[in-house]
Amino acid sequence: MLGSTLSISISPVLAATDLDIDNDGVLDDVDNCPRLQEDYFGEIDGCPSRNLNWVDSDSDSIPDNVDQCILSQETFNGFEDTDGCPDNITSELIFDQDSDSIPDMQDNCPLVSETFNNFQDTDGCPDTLAIDSDSDGVQDFLDNCPATLETWNGFA
């Protein structure tokens, strides 16, 4: 076999984890903003710098950097209004018996309004009721012995 040549052909295979939709050099699986190009100013997270004005492609007042549906407008119906996506649920189906703007299906206290005092403001409960004095995982308003740890022995 003197004088013969061996030729090998290699075809590149692109794995799904190697995708970079915005072609900014930051792979999509680690890119915090896969549809926006990294500007390499400050941290390398796949996003343009935070001091830039954000684009709002669908004009729903939710900037593309936090909008989960950048080409579809948010419906603003009181249900997940900060995700930027239209909701399949109509506002007539969203109940909020205590009128605290937290839908009953997400409200831990659907009959008592949230206090909105920058402490656990998304649970739907007034924070005076959400206190757990003995730190046993049972909130005081549900706890028969709010100053004694629960033993979890099957007795109330």
Image: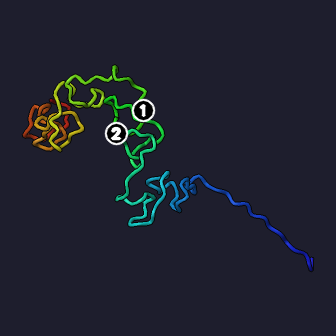
Where is residue 136, by image quadrant? top left
Image: 12 above or below 94: below
Could you tell me which quadrant the C terminus lies in? top left
* Secondary structure found at label 2: loop
The residue labelled by disc 2 is 82
Residue 10 appears at what percent x and percent y?
Answer: 74, 63
The residue labelled by disc 1 is 86
Residues under numbered marks 1 and 2 in contact, where contact means CB atoms less than 8 Å apart = no
Q: Is residue 103 left or right of residue 24?
A: left
Q: Amino acid at mark 2?
A: Thr
Residue 52 appears at what percent x and percent y?
Answer: 37, 57
**10 Å neighbourhood of mark 2: few (<14), some, or many (≥20)?**
some
Image: 35 above or below 59: below
- Measuring 19% from the left and 35% from the top, which residue is drawn there? 153
Where is residue 144, by image quadrant? top left
**10 Å neighbourhood of mark 1: few (<14), some, or many (≥20)?**
some
Spatial separation of the CA atoms under disc 1 and disc 2: 10 Å
- Measuring 78% from the left and 64% from the top, which residue is drawn there? 9
Image: 79 above or below 59: above
Question: 108 and 77: which one is in front?
Answer: 77
Q: Give the total number of marks visible in the rendering.
A: 2
- Measuring 52% from the left and 60% from the top, which residue is drawn there? 24
Question: 129 and 51: which one is in front?
Answer: 51
Residue 34 appears at what percent x and percent y?
Answer: 49, 52
Could you tell me which quadrant the N terminus lies in? bottom right
Colour style of the rendered protein structure: rainbow
- Measuring 51% from the left and 54% from the top, which residue is drawn there? 28
Q: Amino acid at mark 1?
A: Pro
* Secondary structure found at label 1: loop
Q: Which mark is residue 37?
A: none
